[in-house]
Amino acid sequence: MIAPASILLVASASAAPPGRLAVVALDFTYPHASFRLTLYSTGGRAQTTLVRASASSPLTRVAAPAWSADGRLLYFTGSGPEHEGERFHYLDSDVYAVDPASRRVRRLTHTRDAANA
């Protein structure tokens, strides 16, 4: 049996509100992976999970978190389910914003290719 593992990808903290880091965590338990966009204190304690993404949810992946200039919103790219193209598989991706206070997520773009922009 393969043991569960977590990999943390830390967003830039330079524009973050004081004392908070936005982190995308990849939880991998063979054969499935899930992603969490979570706020941590600068001391390393998890505060709030804002977004969860997995194969069974509308968002299957989250990445590239970045704080708004005023520190009130957190932007990120989100991907939907994998699609099969003529010669390859691909993920639609767009830019989203989440309000940490309400955990309300809004889709900001409809390009389906934000990860490559």
Image (cartoon, rainbow, N blue to C red):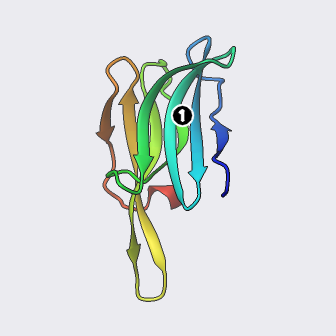
Quarter of the image for the N terminus: give it: bottom right
Q: Going by the picture, which residue comes out furthest to the front?
A: 1
Q: Is residue 50 visible?
A: yes
Using the rendered view, name the quadrant where residue 21 is placed: top right
Q: Residue at x 43, y 51 (%)?
A: 54
Q: Residue at x 60, y 11 (%)?
A: 18
* Closer to us: 30 or 43: 30
Using the rendered view, name the quadrant where residue 25 is placed: top right
* Closer to us: 72 or 104: 104
Q: Could you say where residue 70 lies in the image, as x and y percent from the top left?
A: 47, 18
Q: Going by the picture, which residue comes out furthest to the bottom?
A: 86
As displayed, is residue 84 above or below residue 76?
below
Q: Going by the picture, which residue comes out furthest to the top?
A: 18
In the drawing, does residue 98 fall left or right of residue 71? left
Q: Could you say where residue 22 lies in the image, as x and y percent from the top left?
A: 56, 28
Q: Indicate the amino acid at tag 1.
A: Ala
Q: Residue at x 45, y 56 (%)?
A: 114
Q: Could you say where residue 117 lies in the image, as x and y percent from the top left?
A: 50, 58
Q: Could you say where residue 73 lies in the image, as x and y percent from the top left?
A: 42, 25
In the drawing, does residue 53 fall left or right of residue 2? left
Q: Residue at x 52, y 30 (%)?
A: 38
Q: Is residue 117 visible?
A: no
Judge the density around disc 1: few (<14), some (14-19), many (≥20) Cα neighbours within 10 Å: many
Q: Secondary structure at mark 1?
A: strand
Q: Which residue is mark 1?
A: 66
Q: How many circles with numbers are drawn on the protein?
A: 1
